[in-house]
Image (tube, rainbow, N blue to C red):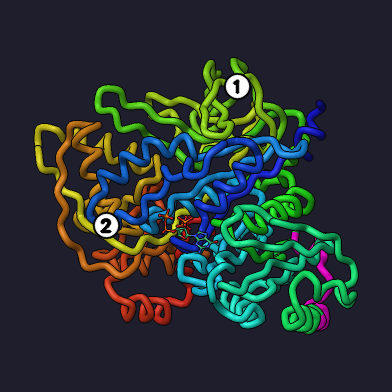
Amino acid sequence: MGLIEEIERRRTFAVISHPDAGKTTLTEKLLLFGGAIHIAGAVKSNKIKKTATSDWMEIEKQRGISVATSVMGFDYNGYKINILDTPGHQDFAEDTFRTLTAVDSVIIVVDVAKGVEAQTRKLMNVCRMRNTPVIVFVNKLDRLGNDPFDLLDEIESELNIKVRPLSWPINQGDRFKGVYNIFQHKLDLYTPNKQVVTESVAFDDVNSPELESYIGEEDASKLREDLELVEGVYPEFDVERYLAGEVAPVFFGSALNNFGVKELLDCFVQIAPSPRPVQTQERLVKPEEEAFSGFVFKIHANMDPNHRSCIAFVKVCSGKFERNVNYKHVRHNKMLKFSSPTAFMAQKKETVDEAFPGDIVGLPDNGGTFKIGDTLTGGEVMHFKGLPSFSPEMFKYIENDDPMKTKQLNKGIEQLMDEGVAQLFTNQFNGRKIIGTVGQLQFEVIQYRLLHEYNAQCRWEPIGLYKACWIESDDAEALEMFKKRKYQYMAVDKDGRDVFLADSRYILDMAQSDFPKIRFHFSSEF
Ligand code: G4P
């Protein structure tokens, strides 16, 4: 198979949702269809959310397993599917944001009863930054939930995207009878606990009296009414608008009962994009270019104290990646070759000889070779964009608790930051180091890992901060003036960029209105 064919058959995506909407269940069912796993219950390893905040050791144990489910690749009807897993716990949201930079589309799971929830909104905002195409799967139709029209309105307004139902539910909860598959003109019937679509009937004309024989009079007339309204309210499905990230097709089903999942998958492989061109600082890179290029979007460290090792996850963006061929590590300006790159098929990791755009390869890294955002190429100097850090929400001073181990501590902090565990800001006024995170858990993770992997001890001290934001200005004088006036609140991030530490919302608002020539950014890429 040539490069073009390999690219066209690849679908690299993530399933995202608010915890408990059914992401794990849906992922598992997709894998079952791909023959990647054979029993239900195999994808529990990344389910870390239920341990909540206290027991993060348990979480880390599971994280060790979760490297296997970081990427789940399988073949389905001639397509090569790569599902990128994202952590369930919202304290690891930053990890999820970065993973979303490596996918070509997403499936969002929404619970029919709970509707759009907080985490879904946040994740959608990240998708919107790259106009990532989105398919919505409304889950748990076997339970009573919202009216589908109300839910679609909610999705449109809360997620700020147009929707287009491609299936339509027939009743809900105990009386759920299945869906009318608008995409394939079929009637898919549901029987509770059967774990499959029990009957699928080609059904072009819902006005045919035959409909009654399948779903009864009441539901038949309701379905006809609903479908008429659907066709009246929502414009015809337009694949181009979906690919542009403007319209999200919507499917209804029940992941737990494996209902509507195959239909979703069949539509997905048809309409979802294969790897798309990617922007670098220098130029747009097309997947079909002959020269290999890719970027590191995730680094996974193992927790073995005797053997510090990481896997850098590289998304192949163009050309063919090959084992034992020299590639340029652009940041280090060095040629490197990799003797044991791994690919992720189903739940196994195996050494691969080649990989194509859309694929993820794991590169073992024992010495801090990689950091998030690094670019590998066939030789050209370019830098992939689109891996921003987001303004963190929690801050603490990190202090050395063992003066004999300063070097170890500094090295540990640097490497953990390169891995993207949290963000480091150095206060310019007093030189103290501040760690910013999106959740409490990361502080515990950092402290534990510094001790066990670097033999360094840290302690946390409180700091009252509201937000850290990156600042810039076209007017060098105005920037200097700002930095002088706010000198106690100025810091630099790990790349030496100016960061303003606002201790309250009021202070931030004031700074923004008092210094109109300064631009304040809440993500590191601007
Ligand atoms: P998540 O990854 O998005 O956090 O959700 P997950 O798949 O773990 O699902 C959350 C809960 O919702 C699970 O129940 C799961 O069985 C249930 N669920 C998923 N899909 C459906 C569905 O279509 N219908 C119904 N009724 N339930 C569904 P749990 O009791 O919390 O966990 P478990 O003990 O079953 O694993």
Q: Provide residue 209's location: percent of width, then percent of height.
A: 88, 76
Q: Main secondary structure of the magenta part?
A: helix
Residue 233 in magenta stretch: yes
Q: Residue at x 74, y 71 (%)?
A: 164
In the image as oriented, which residue stretches furthest toward the front? 213
Question: Which of the 4 image quadrants contains residue 207?
Answer: bottom right
Residue 426 in magenta stretch: no
Q: Which residues are magenta?
A: 228-242
Nearest the camera: 334 or 104? 104
* Quarter of the image where the C terminus is located: bottom right
Q: Provide residue 412's location: percent of width, then percent of height.
A: 27, 36
| Left or right: residue 123 compared with residue 512 | right
Q: Provide residue 86's location: percent of width, then percent of height.
A: 48, 49
Q: Is residue 283 visible?
A: no
| Mark 2 CB near ligand 1 (8 Å cut) | no
- Mark 2–mark 1 Cα distance, whole angstroms, equals 38 Å
| Left or right: residue 396 compared with residue 141 | left
Three-letter code, disc 1? Val
* Secondary structure under the numbered disc 1 in the rendered image: loop
Q: Residue at x 52, y 23 (%)?
A: 334
Q: Residue at x 55, y 66 (%)?
A: 140
Q: Residue at x 36, y 27 (%)?
A: 309
Q: Is residue 223 visible?
A: yes
Question: Which of the 4 image quadrants contains residue 202?
Answer: bottom right
Where does label 2 land, which residue? 53
Mark sitting on residue 352? 1
